[in-house]
Image (spheres, rainbow, N blue to C red):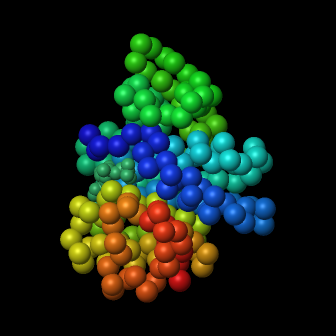
Amino acid sequence: MAFTFFFRDRHTLEHFARLVTQDINNKSEVKIWDAGCAMGQEPYTLLIILAEMLSSDDYKKIKVIATDIDENSLFHSVINSGIYPYDQLSRLPEGILEKYFTKLGEDEYKLSDKILNSLSFTKQDLLELVPIDNHFDGIICKNVLLHFTPQQQIDVLKMYNNSLNNIGYLVTEQTQALPSEVSHKFEKVLSDANIYLKK
Ligand SMILES: C[S@@+](CC[C@H](N)C(=O)[O-])C[C@H]1O[C@@H](n2cnc3c(N)ncnc32)[C@H](O)[C@@H]1O
């Protein structure tokens, strides 16, 4: 199983959530792609952060498309069910478990429909270089690029650049520096988080 958990790198996701919704009053939809989403822990964390940050009307404008290569075809059913064991949830901030999850059994919690209904999952191999959609306001691709060769990273980052709106944000993991072949296409917007604005 891919290593991850709810509220991993909360700091970066909170900054991203603020940036990607800063113009939400002038929009009917805010569309976000989480590429390499594992079993949904990261995109669902983002949605919980957005639900906490936005009014209900603005939250309804959020649409997250989550994709993963999902090699064993296991992720789809977990993401759709929204059921997770407690060890995935042990780092939730205070009050979030009670507010967004229902306890099903000794070690099982189910995410609320409000969060589940804002996400759709599609199985996808990023290395096929076919974007799942375009005109994204934001793309999250964390702890995925490190599995790719330098040329694959460049190709995938170019695909992200083409798939973003003119004002569109890309998030990568802290350890990921953008290769020089694509770094001119993005501007880093924060010193303490790997969030880039499309140039
Ligand atoms: C370590 S997990 C990262 C999960 C989440 N983004 C995070 O940072 O917590 C890496 C994920 O990348 C996915 N992945 C690896 N190669 C991929 C590819 N070619 N296309 C799409 N997803 C891929 C894996 O299946 C895995 O779920």
Q: Quadrant of residue 157?
A: bottom left
Return the x and y of residue 189 as percentages of the image width and height.
Answer: 54, 72
The answer to whether 3 appears left or right of 7 in the picture is left
Q: Residue at x 37, y 55 (%)?
A: 36
Q: Quadrant of the N terminus?
A: top left
Return the x and y of residue 112 as percentages of the image width and height.
Answer: 59, 31
Q: Is residue 120 visible?
A: no
Q: Is residue 156 visible?
A: yes
Q: Quadrant of ligand 1?
A: bottom left
Return the x and y of residue 67 as percentages of the image width and height.
Answer: 41, 54
Residue at the far front in the pictured view: 191
Residue at the far top in the pictured view: 106
Counting every numbered tag in the picture gives 0
Q: Residue at x 24, y 66 (%)?
A: 148
Q: Residue at x 51, y 43 (%)?
A: 44
Q: Residue at x 36, y 47 (%)?
A: 38
Q: Is residue 147 above or below residue 84?
A: below
Return the x and y of residue 59 as percentages of the image width and height.
Answer: 70, 48
Residue at the far left in the pictured view: 149
Q: Quadrant of residue 4?
A: top left
Q: Is residue 7 above or below residue 147?
A: above
Q: Quadrant of residue 29?
A: bottom right
Q: Is residue 78 above or below residue 35?
A: above
Q: Nearer the viewer, residue 112 or 23?
A: 23
